[in-house]
Amino acid sequence: MKKTVFCVIAHPDDEAFGPSGTLAILAKTYDVHVICVTDGASDPRFHPIGGKTLSDMRKEELKASGEALGIHSLHMLGFQDGTLNNNQYHEVAAKLQKLVDVYKPKLIVTNELRGVSGHLDHVAVAMISSYIYRENKSIDAIWYSCTTKSSSNLMGKYFVFFPPGFDREEVDMVVNVRAVFTKKIAAARCHKSQQKDALRVIAKWMISPKEELFFVTKRRDTFVIA
Ligand SMILES: [Zn+2]
């Protein structure tokens, strides 16, 4: 039986703009499940199109992105975008724990503890995933996706403090994603409601090393792909 990997994200698109290449590589060997904590529907610029809400659209986009990456299964936890905080920590953790009990993941992939971009939903997701990892000794490892110094410098003005990224020498694992780069681009393109971000991110990837960076906490060396 294939081992299960959980990728825990805050918003539809965090899988694509984050560790998508690594997910595509993992999906060749393992059952990769994406668990998306919020519906990503707090964009005030959006107006419903053809009866579709932003929540519907973003779910469809995430589904398409998952298909591009070879993701096995998608779970939406249904929390409101932009609202994750201490009040829901335990509620989110309980929902995540239920999925852990059913699917018994051996690896969790999530974003780094500063939330990559400093987005507080991302920070919450990293904290809750860390808690789940700590409490479930059956999980072999947790990989925290982060960004490079050069790409965080390219972000320009962001709505909250954007922490500096890392040099490849500073992280625990560098995954070469060249072989799945077209899947990475395809997944990002699926997020049509976020097209501006997608185009900016893709342009950045084109001129950057085809690598994804991670911090790793592990109990066992089961997952080595770098
Ligand atoms: Zn996000």
Image (spheres, rainbow, N blue to C red):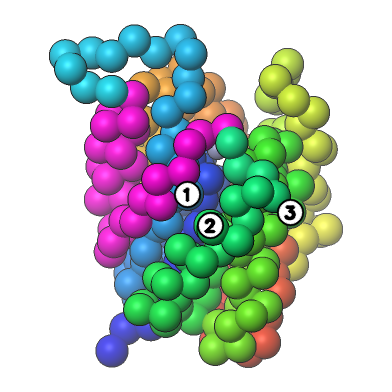
Q: Residues within 10 Å of mark 1 (few under 14, many from 20)?
A: many
Q: Is residue 89 left or right of residue 27?
A: right
Boundaries of the magenta span:
54-82
Quadrant in which residue 223 is drawn: bottom right
Can residue 189 be seen from the camera position used here? no
- Quarter in which the N terminus is drawn: bottom left
Camera-side mark, 1 or 2: 2
Camera-side mark, 3 or 1: 1
Q: Secondary structure at mark 3?
A: loop
Distance of mark 2 from mark 3, alpha carbons?
17 Å
Residues tagged 1 and 2 counted as in contact (Cβ below 8 A): yes
- 6 vs 84: above or below: below
For residue 113, which numbered disc appears in the image? Answer: 3
Please state which amino acid type lies under the numbered disc 1: Val
Q: Residue at x 16, y 14 (%)?
A: 50
**Pointer 1 residue:** 37
User: What percent of the width, then of the height, locates residue 24?
Assistant: 39, 58
Q: Is residue 87 left or right of residue 5?
A: right
Frontmost residue, 69 versus 104: 104
User: What percent of the width, then of the height, locates residue 53?
Assistant: 28, 23
Distance of mark 1 from mark 2, alpha carbons?
7 Å
Residue 222 counted in the magenta span: no
Please state which amino acid type lies under the numbered disc 2: Val
- 225 vs 1: above or below: above
Q: Residue at x 67, y 67 (%)?
A: 130
User: What percent of the width, then of the height, locates residue 131?
Assistant: 66, 69
Q: Residue at x 36, y 50 (%)?
A: 76
Please state which amino acid type lies under the numbered disc 3: Leu
**Pointer 2 residue:** 92
Residue 61 counted in the magenta span: yes
